[in-house]
């Protein structure tokens, strides 16, 4: 039925990613983490998308980093190396926080610390919640739980 949509309706539908609502704990949890740490996005989404998401939902990132900066996509190791370099830290001083085991495995592969945040609905109401990858440094039920574990 998409052919029945007007161009303005198609455009609004195509840009829905720019208006996604964050997980309920995300904004407050990130604010807690920012009291102690620099918080950055690291996404395969482009910078414009990430800026729009942050603006729309008031996501408190200190930095917006996108894989587009190195013209590659995660899990390419160069994406994670770029993030550490842009933040001015060694990979071992950074922590990748994600609900996607493959993302955490790739980040750990270049030396990042890792934290798995369980998002039971990430794969839909009937999806299977993945397990944290082997060697994951922290496991959290949400960003408040992660902040508490990290002393924030």
Image (tube, helix red, strand yellow):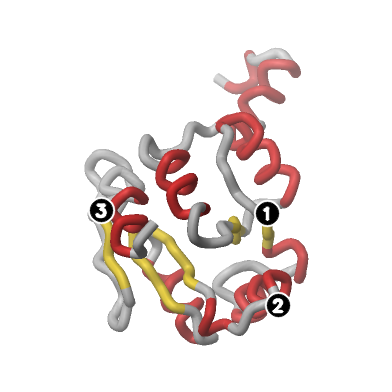
21 relative to 126, above or below: above
- What residue sits right under mark 2 in the picture? 85
Secondary structure beneath dot 3 equals: loop
- Residue visible at 77% across and 65% down in the picture: 69
Residue 56 in percent (x, y) is at 62, 29
Residue 13 in percent (x, y) is at 61, 25
- What residue sits right under mark 3 in the picture? 141
59 relative to 127, above or below: above
Say whether residue 119 is left or right of residue 95: left
Q: Quadrant of the N terminus?
A: top right
Label 1 crowd bin: few (<14), some (14–19), many (20+), radius 10 Å: some
Say whether residue 69 is left or right of residue 102: right
Precedes in sequence: disc 3 or disc 2? 2
Residue 23 in percent (x, y) is at 40, 39
Precedes in sequence: disc 2 or disc 1? 1
Precedes in sequence: disc 1 or disc 3? 1
- Residue visible at 55% across and 73% down in the picture: 75
Q: What is the quadrant of residue 83 in the picture?
A: bottom right
Q: CA distance from mark 2 to mark 1?
A: 13 Å
- What residue sits right under mark 1 in the picture? 64
103 relative to 78, above or below: above
- Residue visible at 68% across and 59% down in the picture: 66
C-beta proximity under 8 Å, tags 3 and 2: no
- Residue visible at 70% across and 42% down in the picture: 51
Say whether residue 117 is left or right of residue 112: left
Secondary structure beneath dot 1 equals: strand
């Amino acid at each position: 039925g998409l052919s029945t949509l007007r161009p303005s309706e198609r455009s609004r539908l195509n840009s829905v990613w720019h208006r996604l609502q964050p997980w309920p704990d995300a904004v407050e949890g990130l604010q807690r983490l920012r009291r102690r740490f620099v918080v950055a996005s690291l996404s395969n989404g482009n910078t414009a998308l990430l800026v729009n998401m942050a603006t729309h939902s008031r996501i408190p990132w200190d930095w917006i980093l996108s894989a587009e900066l190195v013209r590659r996509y995660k899990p390419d190791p160069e994406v994670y190396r770029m993030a550490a370099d842009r933040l001015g830290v060694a990979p071992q001083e950074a922590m990748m926080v994600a609900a996607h085991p493959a993302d955490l495995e790739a980040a750990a592969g270049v030396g990042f610390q890792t934290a798995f945040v369980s998002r039971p609905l990430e794969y839909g109401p009937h999806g299977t919640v993945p397990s944290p990858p082997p060697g994951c440094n922290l496991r959290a039920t949400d960003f408040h739980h992660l902040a508490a574990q990290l002393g924030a």
